Image (cartoon, rainbow, N blue to C red):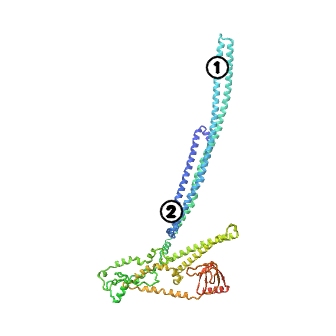
Amino acid sequence: MSWGTELWDQFDNLEKHTQWGIDVLEKYIKFVKERTEIELSYAKQLRNLSKKYQPKKNSKEEEEYRYTSTRAFLATLNEMNDYAGQHEVISENMTSLITGELTRYVQELKQERKSHFHDGRKAQQHIETCWKQLEASKRRFERDCKEADRAQQYFEKMDADINVTKADVEKARQQAQLRHQMAEDSKAEYSSTLQKFNSEQHDHYYTHIPNIFQKIQEMEERRIVRIGESMKTFAEVDRQVIPIIGKCLDEITKAAESIDHKNDSQLVIEAFKSGFEPPGDIDFEDFTQPMKRTVSESSLSNSRGDGKSEPKFGGKSKGKLWPFIKKNKPPPPPPASASPSAVPNGPQSPKQQKEPLSHRFNEFMTSKPKIHCFRSLKRGGAGPEDFSNLPPEQRRKKLQQKVDELNKDIQKEMDQRDALTKMKDVYIKNPQMGDAASVDHRLAELGQNIEKLRLEVQKFEGWLAEVEGRLPMRTEQARRQSGLYEAQNTSAVNSCAQDRESPDGSYTEEQSQETEMKVPATDFDDEFDDEEPLPTIGTCKALYTFEGQNEGTISVAEGEMLYVIEEDKGDGWTRIRRNEDEEGYVPTSYVEVYLDKNAKDVYKSLQKISE
């Protein structure tokens, strides 16, 4: 089955068909190109969708992603981002393997088709030229034969006519012979041209045209095969990313299966647990019996009254509503302007006797500013530095978070210092690369920053140790550091203490119990103050001037000699003594220490014995 033999006379139709094939190929290229644009648009939309729901840095949403359900959602967003990436891969592969390749192939195909049909037209023109030559030779032969016949007839007519001279007859005879010779020559030429044309025509229809059409057929078949291969590639590009897309979907399924409702419930407890005990039962107050008071009781109540005519709930139960309120100071005395009529001194009125219990319960439930004192303190401002306005559990978390942040900052500063130190060493070894003294100022700044951060870490670690129970009670230093908060919140605490009064104007017994709980702290401070001074283990020389402004530090001057009583334990501080009354901590980098070996050995032995 060959186009050259079967379609030898369909040159024009083959030309139209091959042009249609190229149009189909270009249409398929356009289809794939639009598919790649759709894939890119889809991937972009997926990425924007994933980015839209990603938690913002340093926001409240970022804290919410500690729950397993929200972490699973975050994993889903990340997998959707990878999912979008696979659609970008589809677009890239289709562009490079299909669109780009087919575009180049179409250009080559057009050139090849043009060449083949040019050869076909050239062969067609050649056979047409041969046919024209044959027709011209035939017409000439026909004309010469007619001329020869007329010349012969004229000669015969002249020869039969007796009136014509012999010269005229001879002339006619010669003319007839000439015409016959010309006819013979035309006949020979026509015969030769006819043979040549037949040979050319045979070659045209059985050799040249079949070869050209065969090449056109092969070209068209290659186009068909190529578009089929492109369609396979089209499917294969999708198939290649299916495992990765399936893996993304598997990860989404895995993230969904990792959701632990029990764990999320525990995280809610850890996030909002205050560490307080729930309030105790409210004592029943019998309003059916008249209140009998002595004159002394009434005067005492009047002196402590708060100006409210309606009695309050029992002090014991009410005291349990504020286990988080500070009790460093005794409650303030009642205001002197309290009216004696504020406390009832006789039988209650019928209205007071018949007051329903639901009204009393509603009054209790609406007294939130008195119960939740720490909330009003927290709303009043940014809060104290030691987070003492928070419940114990929340305070511990905030302090631990602060310590971790400070340690990260210290590590960053130390990394910068190490890098600058290495740079300085390089400058010292190779002065042409830079001035070593140019980094000294920055190194000093980094040293000061590190010391400040370490002081902050020690301060917060002290508060953290207090909250976690590592310290028996609050130390004097911690109390001084949180004194600012106590001064700010004294009025709020006092107002809470006033609300703890019983209906007769006296304070509850639980108040005295809370005051008694503070006695061990004083004993602990006394024991701490009565410690024997530490022995000296060496001497040191101050390299720089240090102004000890923080609690527990000591000021030194450059070049001053002092005694070392405790070496650096890895926190960057050395404990020194100037005399028996002055001792404290200085940064280790600010002094040059000369330890006494014997004293150091004795000191380490004492440390091991104490441990």
Q: Residue at x 69, y 14 (%)?
A: 170
Image quadrant containing the C terminus? bottom right
Q: Residue 479 at what x, y percent from top left?
A: 51, 82
Question: Which of the two discs, 1 and 2, labels the residue nearer the N terminus?
Answer: 2
Q: Is residue 545 above or below residue 106?
A: below
Decide which of 276, 518 is in the foreground and name it.
Answer: 518
For label 1, the SS is helix
Question: The residue under label 1 is which amino acid type?
Answer: Asp
Label 1: how many Cα within 10 Å (few below 14, some 14–19, many 20+): some
| Count of all numbered marks drawn on residues in the image | 2
**Residue matched to label 2:** 52
Question: The residue under label 2 is which amino acid type?
Answer: Lys
Q: Residue at x 55, y 75 (%)?
A: 403
Image quarter of residue 300: bottom left
* Farthest left residue in view: 350
Image quarter of residue 501: bottom left
